[in-house]
Image (tube, rainbow, N blue to C red):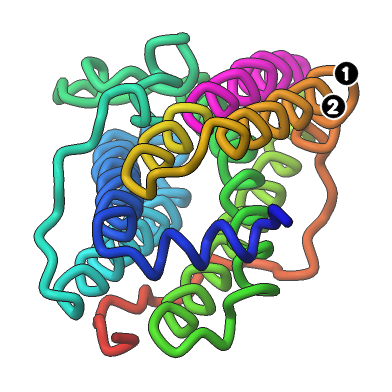
Amino acid sequence: MLSARSLFQEIVDHDDSFQLFCSIAASGESQGGWENARIAALVPDGMRELAPKITRHGADEDKHGRIFQALLRKRGLPPVPVPPETDYTMLLERRGIGLAHEKLRRDEQLTERDIVVYLAHSRVTEQRAADQMDMLLRRFGDHPEVGKAIRMISHDEDNHLAYCHEELLRLVRGGHGRIIQRVLRDSALAEIRVYRDVSLAVMDHMGRLLHWPAPKRAALAAGIHAVYAYERFAGWHRMISLRLPERRNALGGAPLTSPEYA
């Protein structure tokens, strides 16, 4: 019987699939770390109070990248190139979602609208990250090899999501509600398509590495399409709602930068 637990266990147990999984995850987290560091450096003067939180967000993402790299080292595995069709961050950028890397590479101060777009985009992608890590936490939080890493990353992703909710609600009160709702909607609809495409690509690569039979691959692809159909019909609405989080000022403290989790 196919289940998220059995699939992830297969991936973790096989060196080649584990190597690809950790390489994809490390690359995505490292990209997120770079993006947040650049945004923090370019925050407009009128929003400088956000810079420490954006910096903390980027430091967390960098830490997550190092966590996945350390998991590879513990197995004696080097990272492998990330197939472009599995690059979630870059595929979102190609759809015009978030702040373009070209803009972030310039030494030009961002606008207030840019920060609104960044936070709205992050609210959507952090919802996905928090949901994925919650699923892994429930099934693998006590795993002897990856459990500690999952617990740490899941805690951070919950903080990131709380921070996005809190800051966006503050910006709504400041008169940015209309643009926030528009960007949230556009980001969510683009994200669910990209997530479907990346999920299909990742499962295709895993299927070849693990020699899954055609019926199993077909069943997994059908499941991914079913999730997309639900999200396209109704599920995306939960990715754009805003509520005051239980965790207040979630990124107000100092970042944890050490990799002792491994």
| Secondary structure at numbered mark 2 | helix
- Label 1 – label 2 distance at C-alpha: 5 Å
Residue nearer the viewer, 38 or 229: 229
Q: Quadrant of the C terminus?
A: bottom left
- Which secondary structure type mostly characterizes the magenta part of the structure? helix
Residue 113: mark in rendering:
none
Residue 187 at what x, y percent from top left? Answer: 62, 21
| Image-quadrant location for residue 196 | top right
In the rendering, at what x and y percent does residue 68 appear?
29, 65
User: Where is residue 137 shown, x and y percent of the image?
Assistant: 62, 73
Labels 1 & 2 near each other (Cβ < 8 A): yes
Residue displayed at 22% across by 16% down: 102
In the image, the segment drawn in magenta is 178-199
Q: Is 32 on the left-hand or right-hand side of 246?
A: left
Alpha-carbon neighbours of circle 1 within 10 Å: few (<14), some, or many (≥20)? few
The reply, left or right, for residue 32 in relation to residue 258 is: right
Residue 111 appears in the figure:
no
Quarter location, residue 237: top right
Which residue lies under the disc numbered 1?
233
Residue at 27% over, 89% down: 260
Is 154 left or right of 69, judged from the image as shown?
right
Say which mark, if any, is on residue 230: 2
Q: Is residue 178 visible?
A: yes
- In the displayed structure, does residue 169 sit left or right of residue 141? right
Place of residue 163 in the rendered image (x, y in percent of width and height, measured from the top left): 61, 55
169 vs 107: above or below: below
Residue 34 in which image quadrant: top left
Count up the numbered dots: 2
